[in-house]
């Protein structure tokens, strides 16, 4: 059986990179796979956070999943901390993961920055918790953006190490699913940096909750170069900001960058941006309207998450019991 697991952190608001690199692809996959979608609130504790905001963001990310088109009746949708197995399996994996593997993780290096000694242990062991998320459910496929590929590879390594240590073919090795034109959407202010929730400038990203005027303003202010759009993808790739805007339009309209260039080669950015604004507003405003509608009834979101957590727990508890037996923890 093929099973999907994926998640997003409830840190600030979701942005266009989260939508095009992840959520939009999840929506397409829900027809072909059994899917488990998680709001990874335990991961959000690895960076500075305010408790009340975290709780609110957790509901908001759940609302965003649904607003993007994920059907909570067909898929399991829950928040990570509601299922104890994630933290339990994280500990078991922490005892099977050499430090050398964690030292290679580029996300830790980026997030910890120069202040390594002040970075918290949870940030360092972020990838073992992520491996626990995936392996707890024996997921076969994990749809993510390009930036998470290294973490999925680590999850495979941990599964392999566990299986070898205990001489059992127990954990499934998950495959990353990195698809579409938009595996890496870049900042609107700097085409060499990825669009990120943690960027200080709100002009660097389009948030799913932005209204039409804000989207228009951000696109108009997006950094570009003075040349008109080129004819070929090869020429486009030499211009990071232009490439990013073309990629965004391609992904929003389910076309390739070559398709977009066929229509817009020779265009000035003023004209191209006007097209992009229309498309972005048309695609994103129904999502933000639906998010607002859902957020008006927090009780309903909580009911959906609770039901999802019950379904997830049923799978997770079985794995935890089996893992305890395998590693030698007494169950009385
Ligand atoms: P995060 O916001 O870090 O929790 O990421 C949630 C999901 O969105 C992951 O699958 C990421 O790979 C994806 N993602 C985040 N930022 C981008 C981006 N700039 N471009 C494409 N995908 C992204
Ligand atoms: N680390 C992922 C991110 O920042 C979020 C995440 C946590 C995740 N656990 C996961 C993604 C399990 C896929 C599967 O984007």
Image: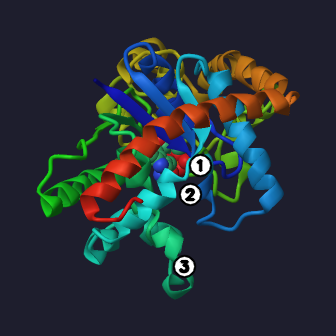
The quadrant in which residue 95 appears is bottom left
Instruction: Check the image and name the residue furthest to the right.
Output: 296
Report whether 314 appears left or right of 139. Answer: right
The residue carrying mark 3 is: 119
Disc 1 residue: CB within 8 Å of ligand 1:
yes
* Element carrying mark 1: loop
Disc with the residue nearer the chain's start (1 vs 2)? 1
Distance between the alpha carbons at the discs numbered 1 and 2: 6 Å
Residue 121 place in picture, x, y as percent:
50, 76
> Residue sitting at 36 percent across and 54 percent down?
151
Distance between the alpha carbons at the discs numbered 2 and 3: 14 Å
* Comparing labels 2 and 3, the label whose residue is closer to the camera: 2
Placement of 99 over or under 231, stated as above or below:
below
* Element carrying mark 2: helix
Disc 3 residue: CB within 8 Å of ligand 2:
no
Query: Are there few (<14), some (14-19), or many (20+) residues within 10 Å of tag 3?
Result: some
The residue carrying mark 1 is: 9
The label shown at residue 43 is 2
Pointer 3 and pointer 1: residues touching (CB < 8 Å)? no
Which one is in front, 269 or 131?
A: 131
Which one is in front, 65 or 240?
A: 65
> Residue sitting at 43 percent across and 61 percent down?
90
**Residue 305 seen in this snapshot:** yes
* Element carrying mark 3: loop
Query: Are there few (<14), some (14-19), or many (20+) residues within 10 Å of tag 1?
Result: many
Image quarter where the C terminus lies is bottom left
Report whether 278 appears left or right of 188. Answer: right
Instruction: Check the image and name the residue furthest to the bottom.
Output: 117
Which one is in front, 225 or 330?
A: 330
């Amino acid at each position: 059986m093929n099973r999907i697991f994926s998640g997003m952190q409830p840190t600030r608001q979701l942005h266009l990179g989260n939508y095009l690199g992840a959520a939009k692809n999840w929506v397409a996959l829900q027809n072909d796979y059994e899917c488990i979608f998680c709001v990874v609130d335990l991961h959000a504790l690895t960076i500075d956070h305010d408790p009340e905001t975290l709780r609110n963001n957790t509901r908001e990310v759940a609302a965003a999943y649904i607003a993007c088109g994920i059907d909570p009746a067909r898929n399991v949708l829950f928040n990570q901390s509601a299922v104890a197995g994630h933290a339990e399996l994280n500990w078991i994996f922490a005892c099977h993961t050499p430090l050398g593997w964690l030292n290679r993780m580029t996300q830790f290096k980026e997030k910890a920055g120069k202040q390594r000694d002040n970075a918290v242990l949870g940030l360092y062991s972020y990838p073992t918790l992520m491996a626990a998320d995936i392996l707890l459910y024996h997921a076969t496929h994990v749809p993510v953006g390009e930036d998470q590929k290294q973490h999925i590879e680590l999850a495979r390594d941990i599964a392999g190490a566990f299986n070898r240590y205990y001489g059992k073919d127990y954990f499934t090795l998950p495959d990353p699913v990195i698809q579409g034109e938009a595996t890496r959407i870049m900042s609107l202010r700097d085409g060499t940096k990825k669009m990120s929730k943690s960027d200080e400038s709100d002009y660097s990203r389009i948030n799913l909750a932005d209204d039409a005027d804000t989207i228009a303003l951000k696109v108009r202010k997006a950094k570009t170069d003075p040349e008109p759009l080129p004819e070929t993808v090869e020429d486009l790739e030499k211009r990071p900001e232009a490439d990013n805007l073309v990629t965004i339009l391609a992904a929003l309209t389910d076309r390739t960058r070559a398709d977009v260039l066929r229509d817009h080669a020779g265009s000035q950015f003023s004209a191209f941006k006007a097209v992009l604004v229309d498309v972005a507003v048309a695609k994103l405003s129904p999502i933000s309207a639906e998010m607002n509608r859902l957020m008006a009834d927090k009780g309903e979101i909580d009911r959906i998450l609770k039901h999802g957590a019950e379904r997830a727990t049923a799978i997770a508890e079985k794995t935890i019991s089996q893992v305890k037996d395998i590693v030698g923890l007494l169950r009385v």
